[in-house]
Amino acid sequence: MKLWCEYAWLGGEEVTAGVVLEIEDERIAAVDSGVTSPPDGAVQLPGYTLPGLANAHSHAFQRLFRGRTEVGAGTFWTWREQMYEAAAAVDPDSYLALARATFGEMALAGITAVGEFHYLHHAPDGTPYEDPNAMGAAVIAAAREAGIRITLLDTCYLHGGIGEELNETQRRFSDGTVERWVERVDALADGLNVGSAPVVRVGAAIHSVRALAPAEMATVAEWARARARPLHAHVSEQPAENEACQAAYGRTPTELLAEVGAVGDSFTAVHGTHLTDADRALLGDAGSRVCLCPTTERDLADGIGPASTLRASGIDLALGSDSQAVIDLFEEARAMELDERLATLKRGNQSAAQLLRAATADGHAAIGWGEGGVIEPGRLADLVNLDGGGVRLAGIRPDSALGSIAFAATAADVTNVVVGGEFVVRDGEHVRLDVAAELGRAIGDLLEAP
C-alpha cells in the first residue's frame, strides 16, 4: 500500500510537504518527501497527517456517566461515589458493548492505541465469573472490534484505603490477594498468546498507594519487571493521598513506590499533580514517565499538572482521556500548556512539537508500543489525517501548521485513521461501526437497567 500525504509531521518543528509512505506488513517500509503530486496508485491523504495518537490512560466504563458528574459542587471523593455507581452496573456483555463504542469514539478522534487501566474484574459482589478474566476479555475484544491497539493495564486493587477494608463496590475490583492477582493475569496473558496478537498487549497497574500494601506493590512491580511489561499507578492525584501516605509510611507515594521497586524506565505515574521536587527527581532519574489527564484533573478540581517542571526534571509526558468527559487528545495536549499558563502567568512553556509528541511518540512508549508514534521506516503504520480545509484549520500556513494543529485542531477535524496500514476511519466515518448509535444503545441500556 502506498499513501501520498499532502503534508505530514515527521517529528520536527514543521510539517513536510508531499510525503509518500510505503506500507508493508503493518509497518512503514519507506518515507519519501517533496513529492508534489500523488504517484500512480497511491491513496491520497489531503490535509495534515500525523502519527496515530496514543491514549495512555483510559477507564472505558466511565463513558457511561459523561455529563452527569461534571455539574455541581463536590470533590474527587464525592465524584468517586458516582463513579462507583457506574462501576457496579456493567457485566461482560454490557461492558463489551460500551467499551467497543467508546473505543470507536477514540478511533474517530484519531486515537490508534489505548492504555486501559482496568480494574472491573469480577461480579458486583466480588465473585469471579466462570472465566475470571471475562471482563478483561470483553475490553480486549472491544478494542479489536473497534480497530485500535490496546494495552490492558490489569490493575491490582486489594484495599479500600490505607489500612481499610473494601467497600461494597470495590469488592469487584479485588482478587483478594496479590497472589491470586498474579495467577489471574498470567492466565490472561498466556491465553492471549500475546506474541501473536499484534494489536493486544498486557501490562500491569498498581491502582494507588491507597489500594495496595507495600509488599503487594512489590509483587506487582516484580511481575511487570520480569515480563518487561509497562507498569502504571495513580500517583499524587490529590493532596489527601499524599497526606495519608505520609501518615502511614512517612514517605510520599513516589518515594514508597520507588522503595518497593515500582519506579523505573517502564513506569508511568498517572496524574502526578502534587509531586514534590524530590519525587520529580526520582522519576526523572529513573526514566519514568508521567501521564497527565488535564480534562479530568480540572473537572475534579485536582489541580494543574506542572508540565514544564516535569519536563525540566527529565520526565517525558503522555496524555490520557481518563474519565472520558471528553475524548480529544488535541484538547488534552494544548491544555497541558494553557492550564499551566494560568498557574504560572507565563506563556510558551512548551512548544507545539512537545505537546504533539506527548500525544504520539511519548504516549506510545508509556503503554508499551514504542514502535509507534513516529512516521519513519520500521515504525507501525498508524496514522491520523486531519482536514486542512475545515473551519478550524482553513487558511493556515504550512510553516506554522504545527502550532495551528496543537492549539486549534479538535477530534472533529479527524478525517482518516489508519492502523497497521488499514483504514479504520475513512472520510470521517468509522468503517466498522456506527459509533453514535452504538454509544446510544450501550449507555441507554445500562441507564435503564434496574
Image (cartoon, rainbow, N blue to C red):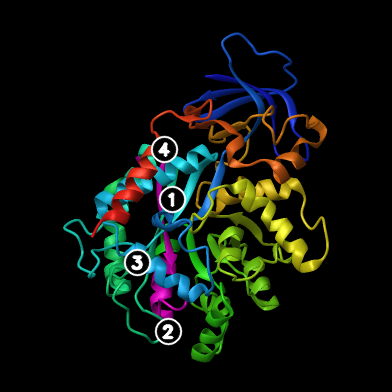
Residue bearing mark 3: 85
Asked whether residue 55 is drawn in magenta, I would say no
Which mark is in front, 3 or 1?
3
Residue bearing mark 1: 151
Residue bearing mark 2: 162
Cβ atoms at labels 3 and 1 below 8 Å apart: no
Q: Tell me the quarter of the image containing the C terminus.
A: bottom left
Which mark is in front, 4 or 1?
4
Residue at coordinates 67% horizontally, 40% vertically from top-left? 409
In the rendered image, residue 79, in percent from the top left (x then y), is placed at 47, 70
10 Å neighbourhood of mark 4: few (<14), some, or many (≥20)? Answer: many
Viewer-side residue, 339 vs 35: 339
Which mark is in front, 2 or 3?
3
The numbered mark at residue 240 is none
Identified by mark 4, the residue type is: Val
Element on which disc 3 rests: helix
Residue at coordinates 29% horizontally, 71% vertically from top-left? 179
Q: Earlier in the sequence, mark 3 or mark 4?
A: 3
How much space separates mark 3 and mark 1, taking CA atoms?
A: 25 Å
In magenta, the rendered stretch is 195-222
10 Å neighbourhood of mark 3: few (<14), some, or many (≥20)? Answer: few
Q: Earlier in the sequence, mark 2 or mark 3?
A: 3
The numbered mark at residue 435 is 4
How much space separates mark 1 and mark 2, taking CA atoms?
A: 28 Å
Viewer-side residue, 430 vs 280: 430
Would you identify the image quadrant in which residue 437 lies? top left
Relative side of 316 to 86, left or right: right
